[in-house]
Image (cartoon, coloured by chain):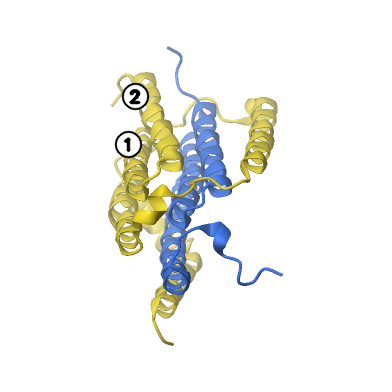
Chain colours: A yellow, B blue
Amino acid sequence: MAPVATPFFFYLLSGVMLIGGILVITRRNAVHSALALIVTLLAQAAIYLMLYAPFVAGVQIILYAGGIMVLFLFVIMLVNLERNLKERQFNRQWLVGVVAAGALGGLFIVVYSKGQSIFPDRALPIAEAQNTQIVGTMLYGQYMFAFEIASLLLLVAIIGAVVMAKKRI
Amino acid sequence: MLHITTLHYLVLGAALFLLGVIGVLTRRNVVIVLMSIELILNAVNLNLVAFSRFWGGVHGQVFAIFVITDAAAEAAVGLGILIAFFRNKETVNVDEVNLLKW
């Protein structure tokens, strides 16, 4: 099926993502930042759909917007401080931040303008209907070892989180 | 309007990455620093999926799934550390974490 109005949706979703990102790093209240981050993640899931990656889009919504952000909100509620809202929100490293962001941005501009010719310009035909099957086959076939390592990583993270949050070890 | 190429997605990813970097470097609240790290990881994911689309394979999508796994593990451990820190110092500001400072 031919895509409809791709540029319009691309610019709309990028605008939503960037505004959400700016809100994340500027809001005073951490709950507002978390809500802005959820908007950004959902817009990004829609962009994954535009890129014909429905499985990643689903994982993004369920795992990121559903799982990780709930974890964030829980912790924000746990450590919520009225005092924190009245404090200075930015540290004194804004100069370092501007320099680092400027250097990285310059690097991106140089790399992208020099390397523009080697980026694929036109999308290759892709099997959209079997995306989930292909990803699953690859996860359990070619990337089996990495998949097992990922499960080990999650086990370590669970144990680590419990140990860190325990009152007395 | 022109049609959307790989470069559009890469520029969007770069902008998101820079927002995350600025957040990590300048915010004081640990929770928001962790959220900025999530922004950075999402920018990387966007690049991976965009390249996977325009090269016509799904390797990039598989990598994006691994990155999401890493983000989950990182968030769990980071927030656990944050709770332990908050219990000890009653604050969530990064620049007051100076127990190991020489």
* Disc on the earlier residue, 2 or 1: 2
Residue at 45% over, 18% down: B3
Q: Nearer the viewer, residue A157 or B86?
A: B86
Residue at 60% over, 72% down: B99
Q: Nearer the viewer, residue B91 or B85?
A: B91
Q: Nearer the viewer, residue B43 or A29?
A: A29
Number of numbered discs on residues: 2
Residue type at mark 2 is Phe
Residue B33 visible in image: yes
> What residue would you read off at disc 1?
A46
The residue furthest top is B1
> What residue would you read off at disc 2?
A9
Residue type at mark 1 is Ala
Q: Provide the secondary structure element on which disc 1 rests.
A: helix
Mark 1 and mark 2 in contact (Cβ < 8 Å)? yes
Vertical arrangement, residue A37 with respect to residue B85, above or below: above
Residue at 36% over, 58% down: A81
Q: Provide the secondary structure element on which disc 2 rests.
A: helix
- Which quadrant of the figure has residue A119? top right
Q: Residues within 10 Å of mark 1 (few under 14, many from 20)?
A: many
